[in-house]
Image (spheres, rainbow, N blue to C red):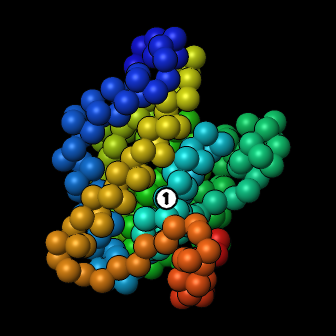
């Protein structure tokens, strides 16, 4: 990852993602299995961000070809789009993660929690603790160096966003979400378990997506 920011973006990113997938393929399979089992049992896969730099964890939500079971757990004030300075200050604020977890009220036993933890924020650690207390499976995508002893069901490491890697940490976080989605769909297809995915954004699919929104909107608050 060192000095990747000085290399052409797409070739360097492609090589890095291929290397990451090869090194962490077994963990990606474990994460996909958790997601597939959640869908099979009628649950939701919650996507949670603990700071302003982890918004890429929401990428699979409402995207064509992605599972409809992805459910964001987020607070707009954590986003730089709602005030950069404010979101920067909030990244170290206590109790936000606990509040978000309790506020959504749609997290049930059998669900899976995917936490994007780019900056090592208190909110991410709080959501991890809440999920563990409720016996919710956790996929933790984190840059914390002290995370090796954590009790997450699946731990996927990622580099912190700094001057040496620039946008790569966010792009990696996004790619991990899509890869979990792809592998989970493959598992569901192999087991012949029914599942819903969002359809392409074109007029011929509008009615299908509207039907899916109506099906899931009582369970997924962001719909």
Which image quadrant for residue 184?
A: bottom left
* Residue 29 located left or right of residue 90: left
How far from the left and from the top, in percent, is residue 37? 27, 73
> Residue sitting at 37 percent across and 30 percent down?
14
How far from the left and from the top, in percent, is residue 9? 49, 23
* Residue 191 located left or right of residue 69: left
* Residue 47 located left or right of residue 43: right
Quick one: which residue is furthest to the front in this view? 204
213 relative to 36, above or below: below
* Residue 218 located left or right of residue 125: right
Which image quadrant for residue 222?
A: bottom right
Is residue 109 in sight in this rendering?
A: no
**Where the N terminus falls, by quadrant?**
top left
Q: Nearer the viewer, residue 111 or 186?
A: 186
How far from the left and from the top, in percent, is residue 125? 50, 49
Total marks placed: 1
Element assignment for label 1: loop
> Residue sitting at 63 percent across and 64 percent down?
100
Q: Which residue is mark 1?
A: 60
Q: Nearer the viewer, residue 142 or 71?
A: 71
> Residue sitting at 80 percent across and 49 percent down?
82
115 relative to 202, above or below: above
148 relative to 105, above or below: above
Q: Nearer the viewer, residue 217 or 129?
A: 217
> Residue sitting at 65 percent across and 64 percent down?
99
- The 10 Å Cα crowd at callout 1, few under 14, some 14 to 19, many 20 or more, is many
Is residue 211 in sight in this rendering?
A: yes
How far from the left and from the top, in percent, is residue 149? 30, 41
């Amino acid at each position: 990852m060192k000095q990747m920011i000085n290399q052409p973006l797409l070739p360097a990113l492609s090589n890095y993602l291929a290397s990451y997938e090869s090194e962490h393929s077994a963990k990606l399979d474990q994460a996909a299995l958790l997601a597939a089992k959640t869908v099979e049992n009628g649950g939701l896969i919650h996507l949670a961000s603990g700071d302003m730099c982890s918004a890429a964890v929401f990428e699979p939500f409402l995207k064509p070809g992605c599972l409809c079971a992805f459910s964001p757990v987020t607070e707009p004030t954590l986003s730089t789009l709602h005030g950069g300075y404010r979101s920067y200050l909030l990244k170290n604020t206590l109790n936000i993660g606990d509040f978000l977890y309790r506020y959504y009220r749609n997290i049930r036993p059998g669900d899976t929690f995917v936490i994007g933890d780019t900056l090592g924020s208190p909110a991410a650690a709080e959501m991890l603790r809440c999920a563990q207390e409720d016996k919710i499976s956790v996929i933790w995508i984190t840059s914390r160096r002290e995370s090796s002893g954590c009790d997450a069901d699946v731990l996927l490491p990622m580099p912190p966003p700094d001057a040496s890697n620039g946008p790569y940490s966010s792009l990696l976080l996004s790619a991990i979400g899509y890869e979990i989605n792809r592998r989970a769909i493959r598992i569901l297809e192999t087991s012949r378990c029914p599942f819903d995915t969002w359809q392409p954004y074109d007029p011929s699919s509008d009615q299908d997506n509207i039907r899916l929104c109506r099906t899931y909107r009582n369970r997924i608050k962001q719909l």
